Image (tube, rainbow, N blue to C red):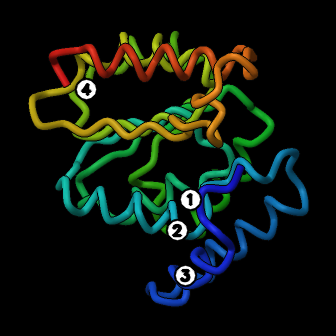
Amino acid sequence: MNFISNEIESYCINNSKDIDPLLKKLERETQLKVLRPRMLSGELQGKFLEQVVKMSNAKNILEIGTYTGYSAICMASAIPDNGILHTIDINAELESMANKYFKLAMLDHKIDMHIGNALDIIPTLDINFDLVFMDADKHNYSNYYDIIIDKLPSGAWILVDNVLWSGKVLDLKNNKDRETIAIHEFNNKITNDSRV
């Protein structure tokens, strides 16, 4: 299920600032060389993330789910030079591609990439994050939330991708896959948490 038409998406892109040519190159290489290129954040989401980082004045960011680094580049470009973005991905095969683009974007000094299970890595990061972006394995969203919530000061932001899961969360009777159920449970958890 598409939530916005191709025409609306094109309109939004055409009425936004031009995308960095390096991000276009990263998107193209992802399309050509990586399985499931649909997972790439893309132009509109990348611009949105960059704007949220600017609005929030985030200095320390945690990203759970690097993929090929598109969203990390967008967010890191908006943090101050003394800021840091910690990004975690379980897929070691994507590390060299992401790091290549971090260097090409001249943002490698702002991005610290971690390879492994985020549930193991996050507890080792002794940082209070200003912003967290979750875009990884959906069945662990609640677990990620549980281990990051105490690392967030008052006023911090949590951004979570795919919370509507292409509309599947609207019809749990016919969508009983693990991801849909996990996202629905996560959404309920957040709704009922008085801390957020």
Which sits earlier in the primary sequence, circle 4 or circle 1?
Answer: 1
Res. 44 mark: 2
Residue identifier under label 1 = 102
Element type at mark 4:
loop
Image marks 4 and 2: residues in contact by CB distance under 8 Å? no
The image quarter in which residue 194 lies: top left
Image marks 4 and 1: residues in contact by CB distance under 8 Å? no
Q: Mark 4: which amino acid?
A: Ile
Q: Is residue 51 left or right of residue 133?
A: left
Residue 147 x, y percent position in the rendering: 36, 12
Element type at mark 2:
helix
* Outermost residue, left side: 154
Q: Estimate the spatial distance between the alpha carbons at disc 1 and disc 2, rounded to whole Å.
A: 19 Å
Against 102, residue 118 (above or below) is above
Q: Mark 2: which amino acid?
A: Leu
Q: Estimate the spatial distance between the alpha carbons at disc 4 and disc 1, rounded to whole Å.
A: 22 Å
Image marks 2 and 3: residues in contact by CB distance under 8 Å? yes
Residue identifier under label 4 = 127
Kindly report which numbered mark, 4 or 2, lies closer to the viewer in this rendering.
Answer: 2
Residue 94 x, y percent position in the rendering: 75, 42
Residue identifier under label 3 = 13
Image marks 1 and 3: residues in contact by CB distance under 8 Å? no
Element type at mark 1:
helix
Q: Estimate the spatial distance between the alpha carbons at disc 4 and disc 3, rounded to whole Å.
A: 35 Å
Against 37, residue 48 (above or below) is below
Against 44, residue 13 (above or below) is below
Which sits earlier in the primary sequence, circle 1 or circle 2?
Answer: 2
Q: Is residue 42 left or right of residue 16?
A: right
Q: Is residue 15 left or right of residue 170?
A: left
Q: Mark 1: which amino acid?
A: Phe
Q: Residue at x 17, y 55 (%)?
A: 57
